[in-house]
Amino acid sequence: MDFDFSADAIALRDSIHRFLMVEAAPEMLREIWETASGRSAALRAKLADQGLTALSVPESHGGMGLGDLEWVLVQYELGYYAIPDSLSDTAYLAAHLLQHLPNGAAAKQDWLPRIASGQVRVAVGHPVNRLVADAELADLLLLWHADEIHALRRDQVQLAARTSIDASRRLFEVRWTASDATRICSAQAGAALWQAVHDRATVALAAQLLGLAQRMLDLGIDYAAQRKQFGKPIGSFQAVKHQLADVAVKIEFARPVLHRAAYALAEQQPLASIHASQAKLACGEAALLAARKSLQVHGAMGYTWEADLQMFMKRAWALDASWGDRSFHKARLAEHVLADGVRLGPGETFAIPEPAARATRAVRSATA
Amino acid sequence: MKLTYTASQQAFRKEVRSWLARHVPKQPLKSFDTAEGFAEHRAWEAKLHSGRWSAVTWPESVGGRGCDLIEWLIFEEEYWRAGAPLRVNQNGVFLLAPTLMEFGTEAQKQHFLPRMASGEHIWAQGWSEPGAGSDMAAIRCAAERVDAPSGSYYLINGQKTWSTRAVWADWCFGLFRTEAGSTRHHGLSFVLVPLTLPGITIRPIRQLNGLTGFAEIFFDDVKVPAEHLLGEEGSGWNVAMATAGFERGLMLRSPARFQATAKALVELYRSRRASADRDPSIRDAVVSSWMQAEAYTLSTYNTASRLVQGGSIGPEASTNKIFWSELDLLMHETAMRILGQDGELMDEPPAAGEHGWLDGFLFAQAGPIYAGSNEIQRNIIAERMLGLPRA
Ligand SMILES: Cc1cc2nc3c(=O)[nH]c(=O)nc-3n(C[C@H](O)[C@H](O)[C@H](O)COP(=O)(O)OP(=O)(O)OC[C@H]3O[C@@H](n4cnc5c(N)ncnc54)[C@H](O)[C@@H]3O)c2cc1C
């Protein structure tokens, strides 16, 4: 049993953390929010310089060939700094889809090297989401159609922008027509790939939500230490302390759940989807509680546009419902936990059931 | 990261499982808060000891197996899985023993540990007093050192209360004020007291379930030989709070206990689904219970694996107590909602292998109070983990 990440992964996380601390100050986020596209080419270029766009692209296609365990640490940082960019969709989700396409698919060769070098943005349209994030600036859209994967260029789709309360999310209704020419993967191979992408998106958002939770807790702590009432910092009042302590408890018990989910993805375990859903629920709960409690601790200041807290809260509220909302993931867990013959209880936490599920075999063969 | 068991850990699990399968009593024992049940549980401790299973984390030289924390978790999983009896000597084996190993003299270790492991000595804890609950540094119970020609002793006068198992226990450990006139955490000493000494009066206290699960202990000129001092005189507070405290916090409630309850809750829900589903929030609470029991398990394995590799735990350990005690309440409250009007009935004790929901529900009410109330834990988290200013 070892919950530690590799020294390399920790070093990567630390360097991204330091980098974002300098490059992604709240003032910069506000500036990007105000732009029409909501995206900054300069920020994207810097993220690419850090190697983030190349993270999980195979070495054979110009990337670093790293995986889910590195990503979960990076995603946490992206959440902590509320990074407004399509990095995760492009470099994690799309890179995963593309590299696991059945052999010979030209799309791999066409796109993976360009993802790695940071030249392109890719949007991913999955049926669990009604809208597609970051479609407007996307060079390529990977879209679901009856479990098939279709690849379209920006000029092959029609977009209608929708506005999110989180100004760093840029969402679009996408209209397009599926054809033999746009299909890059059959439904047979596509089903497992879409599942794998959905699981990764779920864990990615869980990690971002946990990062957001920690950020909002930190903002609450800072504010409580500085703001004085009745001649004392409000953080010395027990009612204030206990609200923040409750957030710390939630975060503390969500983190190992998140890390196990990432491990299950990396190991292609049969229950990876279940663990992913559990992580998203636990991290989402921590983030929503952090938003509520941090706002309360901020008083009226927490209800303003001016206080930085709003950027993190809004992101948490939005991400919590993305890639499967609370009821979606709860239902999935309920189905697992309440099923006949499922192995629960002491000693079963790390047990790996026989991979009876067809989907799992399909992932294996698609990734082989 | 590697979340798998080694071959030797798997072999260990098998060994535990097979021993328990052969020895766990087929019929549940009577509550250890009755005279008869206490004796049955003491006998079970001796049985465990005969297989060298009563204190697996202790060194082999004192009756243990030198297990690390991961093996301890495995042992606990098998123990709860087998529905084995509650541990009447938990206070001794899990709470006192680590302190004894760290601060005890060789003679004390040789004397007390084997007798603890065999169940010959069952231990009670004496921290709380009528005026010292959450504020433990307000302890007043006095132990005055007397150096007599026949041998030095502590003369104890005062009172302890809420002492679990003290009604039938053999020994009690706790903090006493050895320096007259001292205040707060100064001048306290950690002393081991035989509960059979003259001058000790034990008055049982009935708990919510009507049984005498704890007791008041009155000391009236009780002479405790000075050799029963643990650690240095006057440093009792530090002995009690020593680093081992965090580890003891981990061992107080193993995750397997809550996983067993969560599993029983899932089974209860499934067996009464038709009525339970009339309130859809019940199903949600059942699934949440399972999720939280898993989260507690993962978190404990995470901490244990870090400790095994030489790491340490900090004030974040205070989050544990809050998490498991609230989870225990959630699970038992949910069970009571599922049971509806059957929930209140005390006259149908659970059959073998069945969870005692009513008893568990009552005991869950105490979780947020004992072992440092959840409010005190929140204070610790806020001040030591989050760095918020003291009041
Ligand atoms: C089942 C059970 C078994 C026990 N077994 C033992 C035992 O074996 N040995 C032993 O010595 N003791 C034992 N205790 C006693 C236990 O340690 C105390 O109950 C506990 O320390 C709280 O003290 P108290 O009951 O005096 O409550 P109080 O300290 O009077 O607290 C009452 C309420 O006030 C709150 N409160 C107090 N101070 C603060 C503060 N600073 N900030 C915020 N809130 C505060 C508490 O959280 C609690 O909600 C046991 C208790 C129970 C319920």
Image (spheres, helix red, strand yellow):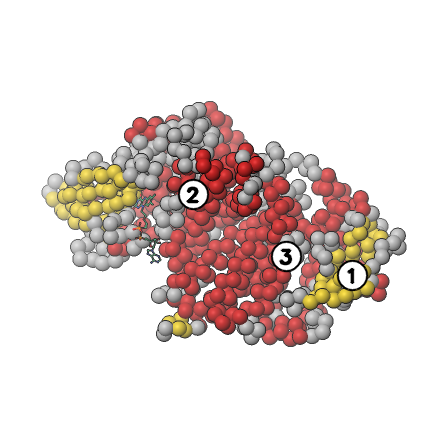
Amino acid carrying mark 3 in the image: Ala
Task: Please state which amino acid type lies under the numbered disc 1.
Answer: Val
Quadrant of the image containing the C terminus of chain A: top right
Quadrant, the N terminus of chain A: top right
Let me know if residue B198 appears in the view.
yes
Q: Residue at x 88, y 52 (%)?
A: A180
Q: Of callouts 3 and 1, which one flags the residue occurring earlier in the amino acid sequence? A: 1
Pick the front one: A271 or B313: A271
**Numbered disc 1: secondary structure:** strand
> Which percent across, then down, holds residue B263?
52, 37
Tally the marks. 3
Q: Kindly give the residue lying farthest to the left in the view shown.
A: B149
- Cα separation between marks 3 and 1: 19 Å
Residue A147 in the figure: left or right of residue A226: right
Q: Position of residue B207 (x, y in %)?
A: 31, 40
Q: Residues within 10 Å of mark 1 (few under 14, many from 20)?
A: some
Query: Is residue B192 at least partly visible in the picture?
Result: no
Q: Which mark is residue A321?
A: 3
> Which residue corresponds to mark 1?
A174
Task: Report the chain holding disc 3.
Answer: A
Label 2 vs label 3, nearer the camera: 3
- The residue under the point 85% across, 62% down is A156
> What separation in Å lies between label 1 and label 2 (alpha carbons)?
52 Å
Q: Secondary structure at mark 2?
A: loop
Q: Which residue is mark 2?
A: B253
Chain to which the residue tagged by mark 1 belongs = A
Above or below, A95 against B76 in this view is: below
Q: Position of residue A353 (x, y in %)?
A: 63, 37
Residue placed most toward the observer, A253 or B69: A253
Seen at 24% across and 46% down, the residue is: B160
